[in-house]
Amino acid sequence: MNPTRKRRLIIVTSVVVAAAIAIGLTVFALQQNMNYLFTPSQVQGGQATQYKTFRLGGMVKAGSIQRASDSLKVSFIVVDAAGAMPVEYTGILPDLFRDNQSVIASGRMDGARFIATEVLAKHDETYMPKELKDAMAKAHENRKIDEAAAKDPSP
Amino acid sequence: MANWVPLWLHKLGSPPIFYRFAGIVRPWALTLAILAAAVALYGGLVLAPADYQQGDAYRIIFIHVPSAWMSLFIYGAMAVAAFVGLVWRIKIAEIVAMESAPIGAAFTFITLVTGSLWGKPMWGTWWTWDARLTSELVLLFLYIGVIGLYHSFEDRRQGARAASFLVLIGIVNVPIVHFSVNWWYTLHQGSTVRLVGPSRIDASMLWPLLTMMAATKLYYVASLFARVRAELIASEGGKEWVRAIALGEDARS
């Protein structure tokens, strides 16, 4: 390789490496602030106390959804592996909202309850036909129990 | 390595040879792209069954996901061409890099729009500032920045060189877009189709998706080659080979 090209190669490569390091460090420094949401156990662990409003993410506990008969008020419990938090919301929920659905609620704390101003549903990355889902439902249930057992290490 | 590979690549670096090569490949790529897209749309919109949880609304993945892949793939191709252009000053490489940018920007725009249309019924919002959505928006701005910087110079090659640096600095964003769903909590779901390990999608839905991926790749080749040919004719205006082509066109009409 002739010297001019070699010099260019070194310059171009070092510019790219420098940019990568600069952006990498910036992203790393922002890591704490870049989280889109907090889970119930993180909130209960005091990680969200500095924020007046924040996003709470987790799964809707099965059977915990209670709708008021005379308004759009809904209350439910959001859980993660190690925590649970009651949530209150007034408004229209997305189509996918139901038991065991991952949801992200924005709002603020009111005592031990979370008052949501917006509830979003997070759909998962699995796509399959409905018939297959029904056929697999039982196998899934078994796997879920296995996973829950595996995920439940006593510290 | 066989000797003919570098020789062949070296020959492709010559504008008249690339012009002819692109002219032969382009119609084939375009025909195959249209055929593959038609098959994929039929497979995805008619043959594939509805999703167990999203119903028919999931069918937007047959546009959204291949476009998203292309938005990253084209950026990668553009960065390789920009790198070759910067170090070896090969004119074709600079042109390929610069003419890739508008195509990549179009795919990124389609990704953002279809994702937004999907987000409203599924998530409950058009837009949210999570890591995946934000980094994809940054990708669109990078493409627009490259196009703008390239055209802000009087001299095309000087513009290409400046824009190539922007391309190479922006490449850092590509892994951020791809891994954002693993690195941070996002509203956007994780990757469905995986190179390593089993994909989380049924085979009846996967094949239209992969066919559409092939269609978008072929379309990129066809569109890129058309653009590069036009740019070559424009920038090599006074050269002998361009004059020969122009005379041939004159004789035909």
Image (spheres, coloured by chain):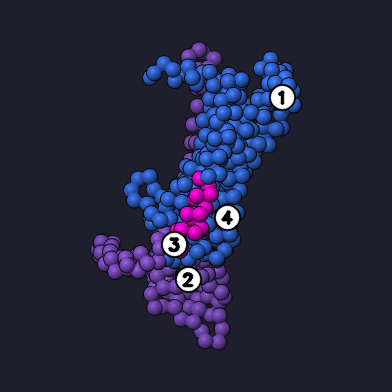
Chain colours: A purple, B blue
In the image, B185 versus B155, the foreground residue is B155
CA–CA distance between discs 2 and 1?
65 Å
| Point 50% across, 45% down: residue | B36
**Picture quarter with the N terminus of chain B:** top left
Chain name for mark 2: A
- Residue A26 location in percent, x, y? 51, 43
Sequence order check, earlier mark of 4 and 3: 3
The crowding category of the residue bearing disc 3, from other C-alpha atoms within 10 Å (few below 14, some 14 to 19, many at least 20), is some
- Residue B113 painted magenta: no
Give, as a three-letter code, the residue at label 1: Arg
Give, as a three-letter code, the residue at label 3: Pro
- Magenta region: B36-50
**Residue A97: which numbered mark, if any?**
2
Secondary structure, mark 1, is: helix
**Residue B114: which numbered mark, if any?**
4
Q: Tell me: residue B27, above or below residue A72.
A: above
Q: Tell me: residue B138, above or below residue B61.
A: above
Residue at the spot of label 3: B49
- Are the residues under marks 4 and 3 on the same chain? yes
CA–CA distance between discs 3 and 2?
22 Å
- Residue B62 location in percent, x, y? 50, 53
- Residue B197 location in percent, x, y? 33, 48
Residue at the spot of label 1: B252
